[in-house]
Image (cartoon, helix red, strand yellow):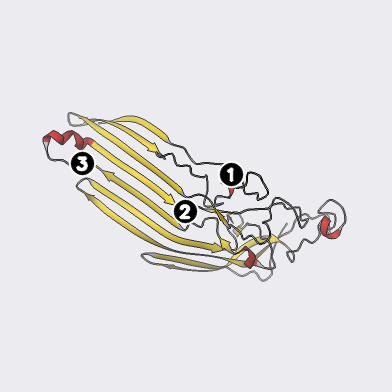
Amino acid sequence: MYGHDINLPTPLCAAINNINFAGGHGLPAFVAGTAGDGRPGYTAKACGTGSSTTIARPNTAFGQIIEISSGSNVNYNGVDLTVTKRMSHGLQFGAVYTMSKALGTVDVQNLSFTYFATPIEDSTNLKRDYGPLSSDVHHSFVFQGLYNPTFRAKELGWANHIQISTMTYMHSGLPINVYNGSDPTGEGVTNARPMFVGRNSLRGKNLYEEDPRISYDVPYKERLHLNLFVESENIFNHQNENCATGSGCTGAVTNNITSGTFMTVTGDRNARLFNFGSKITF
């Protein structure tokens, strides 16, 4: 069952954008949480009425009641540096470095209902949930380059049919939200964080991936061309956790702090991969 705060205002959003700085602050942001004062009310352990968490509810016809309010906020600030070299002498490349910070009390927006569905630990003190968003990436670097030789000497003419390109991805680790794997308050929820541990307080491993490609063009007369190529994904076979901007690295590791495999990687991105191919153009 869903309900809305009677004082629910329309979200106010402001943004600053220019060549190399981008910032945004949203206040308020819609957030869903259990209705009430945030304490473990109407639970078996709190009221001593049995094993079912619904026995002590005033009206047992209702299960969990979700209240949508607007007391949360999210903000983002970042700066980026872009370097671009246009094609000349067979070489072109572009690189972008971004340093940013994304903070807030909620993340993972539910687009169906336009609110943020991240569970709130204590609805009486939202500051306890203020911290890095799951999409918070402090440092990011992307490079793309292409080289096609343009030798004038006839003995090196064959090299002019070679084309070398690469794409480089690097960014710092995404956040990990840990939980204690137990239900100390008797709310029937076992994904609460340990005491005095902030949301998204740990980080996954840095991501690094290099994807090169080499091709050779074999012309035949004027219009017919045979193109041979080899390309690779993650050529250095760097282990990259299967993280996502929506959930960070939480789903890529064992995040139960009481588990014997705590922080063990459970999902990886693609390992080293090679593709060989050819195509004919005419």
Mark 3 secondary-structure assignment: loop
Q: Residues within 10 Å of mark 3 (few under 14, many from 20)?
A: some
- On the image, the x and y values in percent for residue 244 come to 52, 49
Say which residue label 1 marks: 264
Instruction: Answer left or right for 265 relative to 58.
Output: left
Instruction: Give the number of the mark in front: 3 or 1.
Output: 1
From this view, report whether residue 211 is shown above or below residue 60.
above
Work out how far the residue at label 3 is from the one at label 2, CA to CA, in angstroms: 34 Å
In the image, 267 versus 35, the foreground residue is 267
- On the image, the x and y values in percent for residue 147 come to 25, 43
In the image, 159 versus 88, the foreground residue is 159
Q: Please identify the residue farthest to the right as the structure is shown.
A: 49
First along the sequence among labels 3 and 2 = 3
Q: Amino acid at mark 3?
A: Pro
In the image, 108 versus 1, the foreground residue is 108
Instruction: Give the image quarter of residue 108.
Output: bottom right
Residue 163: in sight, yes or no?
Answer: yes
First along the sequence among labels 2 and 1 = 2
Instruction: Give the image quarter of residue 44.
Output: bottom right
Say which residue label 3 marks: 149
Instruction: Answer left or right for 76 relative to 274.
Output: right
Say which residue label 2 marks: 172
Residue 70: in sight, yes or no?
Answer: no
- On the image, the x and y values in percent for residue 104 come to 56, 63
Q: Residues within 10 Å of mark 1 (few under 14, many from 20)?
A: few
Instruction: Answer left or right for 156 relative to 205.
Output: left
Labelled pair 3, 1 in contact (Cβ < 8 Å): no
